[in-house]
């Protein structure tokens, strides 16, 4: 009977600790806004942001009070558990068989019946609790395999919790229900569709299809995500999880994962070509959070240093002269491949960072890559051309237009949560520029300021204040020198050492004195000089 009471206390401690963690991660982040940004917004918008922040602060205070109360209860339960162990009561993680005395005596029966009532309430959580027990007892898979599974579950949870009204599709199993223990290891069925859907206030229907270890031709990426809007407009995205420490493993591994895996293996080779392909990795974001916002040379320059970047991006020219190899770095990726930092951790800062990373990713997928709006369609103001550009993904509301800044783009603000975003277009080719409150999706022209001035991820063009209207025909943009190819006439580049084992090199041959020529792969033209 005492052993049964000990089991009940053990169960309560586990559940309470889990709820305490959930309370901590549910805290609402404050909307950051500077005085400079405030000057660009209408006064009612600034007041709206302050109101939302006040409500968020009040909500966080309620969560904090409940968390403190729960922490005190956990401490009391642990104290009672310690006393029982000192009295020789063996703690059990498996529910003991009820005895007649347990169910019949006044003292024990009260505990038994209260537990039965509680058990009925949390039966749907018992599967998760048993998996938690298995992890604690050491029945886990290799770290890199667990990281793959963790990334999938994290992306699924973020999609369901961050996008307004997102619910599992009727008849579709959630991955948390599908998780099984097999030979002491956690497993999730491969290539099984886990589908969710939502209908926004403007009637747009969004269907999300997520698959773990999906079978795509002869490849098996860790995560495949399909987003379908209004049952017709579909975008496919691929993610591969890499348990990496790029600081220790070096620049070669970083570039190999970006080019070798994200771009060449998945983005270019899959028969149903994805819109974008990214690697998730476990290196802290500073310098290694590459979203395809600039050429890879610039990312390597940011992550390491000029010497490392030039060492990697160099080739030997005809007479033994070495020059920077800019053929790879000339190509802007337009956020179509990269390496995103996503690191497991229980501390509050890590949880918040992961949430911000995934929210930024959802904006990229839904409001940038799922966009079919062009500069010219925007000028026509044809509502039928819009997908989710004017929809707040957090609330599902149709945003109000805050300002049309001299024809350069459209400012949107959610009437409910006051989240602000801007749809602009670059000056050279009219590529989309998506500006988000609190998130820097594209490469900033000047990282030292908080101005919303960005380089175009497609062509690198920048905003120049002397242009009266950068959305109209403006002078061509001259790319920074680090993005320029500087081959000298008459030199034939030898095969770069790094690319000897690259998957595309067999498709390239040397011709005359002009360099290399594309043979079969369509993406070679982006990298090979003529």
Image (spheres, helix red, strand yellow):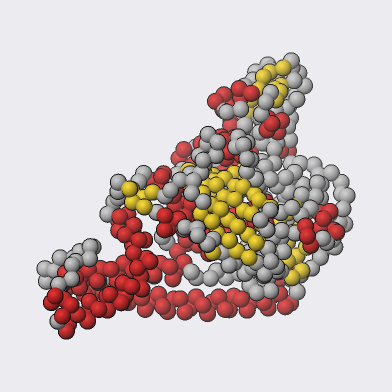
Q: Position of residue 256 (x, y in %)?
A: 54, 35
Query: Observer-nearest residue: 8 or 447?
Result: 8
Q: Is residue 484 visible?
A: yes
Seen in the image, is 406 located left or right of residue 521? right
Count the marks: how many? 0
Toward which corner of the image does residue 316 lie, by quadrant? top right
Q: Pick out the residue farthest to the bottom.
A: 106
Query: Observer-nearest residue: 45 or 132?
Result: 132
Please determine whether, in this image, residue 78 is positioned above or below residue 436: below
> Which residue is drawn at the image coordinates 53% and 34% (left, top)?
218
Q: Is residue 17 visible?
A: no
Q: Position of residue 138 (x, y in %)?
A: 29, 51
Please determine whether, in this image, residue 308 is positioned above or below residue 77: above
Q: Position of residue 120 (x, y in %)?
A: 33, 73
Please determine whether, in this image, residue 29 is positioned above or below residue 354: below
Q: Position of residue 474 (x, y in %)?
A: 87, 49
Query: Observer-nearest residue: 345 or 153?
Result: 153
Toward which corner of the image does residue 105 lie, by quadrant? bottom left
Toward which corner of the image does residue 331 lie, by quadrant? top right
Please determine whether, in this image, residue 453 is positioned above or below residue 258: below
> Which residue is drawn at the image coordinates 69% and 66% (left, top)?
203
Seen in the image, is 423 located left or right of residue 60? right
> Which residue is drawn at the image coordinates 37% and 78% (left, top)?
69
Seen in the image, is 182 located left or right of residue 29? left
Q: Quadrant of the C terminus?
A: top right
Q: Pick out the residue farthest to the front.
A: 171
> Which residue is drawn at the image coordinates 43% and 48% (left, top)?
189
Q: Quadrant of the N terminus?
A: bottom left
């Amino acid at each position: 009977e005492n052993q049964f009471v000990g089991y009940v206390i053990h169960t309560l401690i586990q559940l309470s600790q889990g709820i305490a963690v959930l309370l901590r991660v549910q805290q609402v982040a404050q909307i950051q806004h500077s005085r400079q940004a405030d000057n660009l917004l209408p006064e009612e918008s600034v007041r709206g942001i302050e109101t939302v922040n006040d409500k968020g602060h009040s909500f966080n205070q309620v969560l904090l009070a409940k968390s403190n109360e729960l922490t005190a209860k956990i401490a009391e339960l642990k104290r009672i558990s310690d006393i029982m162990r000192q009295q020789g009561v063996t703690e059990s993680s498996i529910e003991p068989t009820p005895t007649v005395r347990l169910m019949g005596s006044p003292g024990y029966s009260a505990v038994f019946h209260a537990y039965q009532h509680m058990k009925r309430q949390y039966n749907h959580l018992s599967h998760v609790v048993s998996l938690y027990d298995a992890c604690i007892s050491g029945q886990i898979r290799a770290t890199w395999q667990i990281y793959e599974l963790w990334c999938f579950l994290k992306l699924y949870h973020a999609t369901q919790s961050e996008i307004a009204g997102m619910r599992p599709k009727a008849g579709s199993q959630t991955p948390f229900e599908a998780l099984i223990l097999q030979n002491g290891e956690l497993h999730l069925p491969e290539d099984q569709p886990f589908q969710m859907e939502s209908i926004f206030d403007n009637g747009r229907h969004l269907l999300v299809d997520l698959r773990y270890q999906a079978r795509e031709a002869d490849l098996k990426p860790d995560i495949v995500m399909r987003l379908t809007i209004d049952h017709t407009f579909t975008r496919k995205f691929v993610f591969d999880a890499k348990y990496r420490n790029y600081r220790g493993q070096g620049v070669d591994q970083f570039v190999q994962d970006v080019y070798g895996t994200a771009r060449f293996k998945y983005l270019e080779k899959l028969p149903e070509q994805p819109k974008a392909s990214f690697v998730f990795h476990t290196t802290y974001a500073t310098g290694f959070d590459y979203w395809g916002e600039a050429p890879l040379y610039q990312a390597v320059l940011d992550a390491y240093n000029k010497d490392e970047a030039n060492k990697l991006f160099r080739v030997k020219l005809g007479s033994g002269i070495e020059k920077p190899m800019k053929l790879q770095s000339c190509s802007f990726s337009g956020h179509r491949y990269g390496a995103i930092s996503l690191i497991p951790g229980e501390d509050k800062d890590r949880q918040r960072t992961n949430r911000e990373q995934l929210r930024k990713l959802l904006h990229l997928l839904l409001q940038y890559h799922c966009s079919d709006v062009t500069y010219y369609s925007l000028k026509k103001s044809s509502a039928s051309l819009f997908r989710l550009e004017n929809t707040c993904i957090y609330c599902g509301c149709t945003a109000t237009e805050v300002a049309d800044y001299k024809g350069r783009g459209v400012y949107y603000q959610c009437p409910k949560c006051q989240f602000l975003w801007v749809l602009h277009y670059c000056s050279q080719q009219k590529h989309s520029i998506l500006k988000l409150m609190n998130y820097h999706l594209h490469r900033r022209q000047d990282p030292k300021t908080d101005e919303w001035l960005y380089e175009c991820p497609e062509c690198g063009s920048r905003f120049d204040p002397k242009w009266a209207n950068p959305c109209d025909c403006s002078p061509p943009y001259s790319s920074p020198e680090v993005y320029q190819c500087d081959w000298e006439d008459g030199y034939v580049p030898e095969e770069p050492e790094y690319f000897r084992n690259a998957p595309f090199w067999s498709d390239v041959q040397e011709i005359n004195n002009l360099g290399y020529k594309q043979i079969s792969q369509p993406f070679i033209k982006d990298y090979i000089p003529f």
